[in-house]
Amino acid sequence: MTKTFFIETWGCQMNDLDSQRLSGSLKLRGYRRVESEGEADLILLNTCSIRDKSEQKVFSHLGRLRELKSEREELKIGVCGCVAQQEGEAILHRAPWVDFVMGPGNVGHLDQILSGGRKVAIDFPDDRNYDYLTVDRPSGTKAQVTIIEGCNKNCTFCIVPTTRGREVSRPFDDVLREVQAAVASGRVEIELLGQTVNAYRCPVTGCDFGALLSAVAEIDNVARLRFMTSHPAEVNDSMIAAMRGHENISRYLHLPVQSGSSKILRRMKRLYTREHYLETIGRIREAIPEIHFSTDVIVGFPGETEEDFEQTLSLIAEVRYGSMFAFKYSPRPGTPALKIGAPVDDVIASERLNRVFDLHERIKRETLDSYRGRILDVLVEGPSKHDATMLTGRTDDNVVVNFRTDSSPLPGSMLGVRIEQARHHTLRGEAVA
């Protein structure tokens, strides 16, 4: 009888891709994916620890699985991802019904772990065993491709260097082979991934991120190329030139600022100042005037005054981000920020977060309204989830467009769509000839 598996995924695009790798590995072993935990012979929780209460969320979920395990002793439960890396053997002490704990560095070694080799695998092996041919990609038009794992930046608020390890770049030619295989399978949109994606350096040739970006963009049938997450301190002329020189590289760049105050950026150990960040934005806009930016913002970091926060608001207003991820500061175990001081009072931090959202909503509304009447290139993804009479896709700057058309374009096609209406987060329109 065919064994079944279920994967619950929390967190970032890197976790999504890790789950695709785990799924592909299990299917290669003859497992079948199911849509509920009750149907599964193997349950994997692929966890994230970037925010506060991540651990509580995982242990709460494990508590619910305890009853399922008591009813079916043959059921196997594995905790994977960043909470697994952070908590390690402590997970087995608190939840002894868990069968194994596996960190991100061991995703490529699932076979050995399932064979009973280890119950706790939270090291970072020299051989990451990245088999891209087994990745179980859920999209027929898009492929995510890891080019670098880990991070060397050591921001004082961030747990990623602990949970994902030090930077390890994949060989240049290995990345190109994966992209070529993805395109051959019909995926025309490629997204290069890394915790600090533009820190990429080929371990064989020393080629930098700009060189890799150009090489991937020049592969036949790559209709659109995205990448994230970039670090402002790693933006260089090579990267900007690659973006400017290839029209299929998306005019959308996620460039986390975290704070608009140089004082807070120094406390965060972000390796740039407010002035340097805005200079970088200016250099990119000068080279690529049509560029759109998104960002991450943290409010309530230890030592943030009202003046510091006002500098964040003014920077948001100046850059005018198309999209934004904003959070209250979350103390994470083992990070240097714990020694800097107490976070800003939660009531004040919440009020500041709401002010960030209010400002960004106004900017986003003005930006979306500005698209009305324009014809935008939209990469078709398939039927709209909420209206069967329409198709959906994304613009070059990553805005979702739902549209009508008299034709039957295939997923992966590029269409011109005349925008008729701006909604809260999306656009609506009609395809044009």
Image (tube, rainbow, N blue to C red):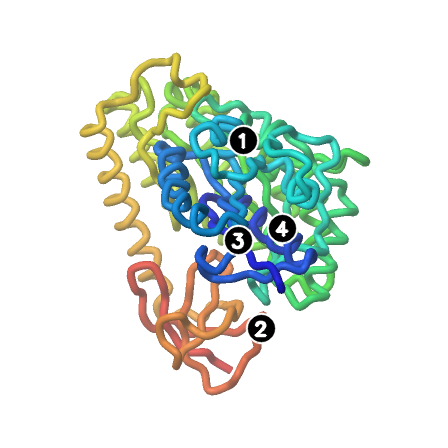
> Circle 1 sits on which residue?
85
Kindly state the secondary structure of the residue where label 4 is placed.
helix
> Circle 3 sits on which residue?
251
Residue located 58% across and 73% down the image: 413
> Circle 2 sits on which residue?
413
Alpha carbon separation for disc pair 3 and 2: 18 Å
Mark nearer the viewer, 3 or 4:
4
Amino acid beneath label 1 = Gln
Amino acid beneath label 4 = Arg
Alpha carbon separation for disc pair 3 and 1: 35 Å
Residue 301 position in % (x across, y down): 33, 24
Q: Is tag 3's residue or tag 2's residue first in the polypeptide sequence?
A: 3
Q: Is tag 3's residue or tag 1's residue first in the polypeptide sequence?
A: 1
Mark 3, other Cα within 10 Å: few <14 / some 14–19 / many ≥20 = many
Whether residue 358 sits left or right of residue 331 in the image: it is left
Kindly state the secondary structure of the residue where label 3 is placed.
loop
> Circle 4 sits on which residue?
21
Kindly tell me whether residue 108 is visible in this rendering: no
Amino acid beneath label 3 = Arg
Kindly state the secondary structure of the residue where label 1 is placed.
helix
In the image, 250 versus 183, the foreground residue is 183
Whether residue 176 sits left or right of residue 278 in the image: it is right
Q: Is tag 3's residue or tag 4's residue first in the polypeptide sequence?
A: 4
Q: Is tag 1's residue or tag 4's residue first in the polypeptide sequence?
A: 4
Alpha carbon separation for disc pair 2 and 4: 26 Å
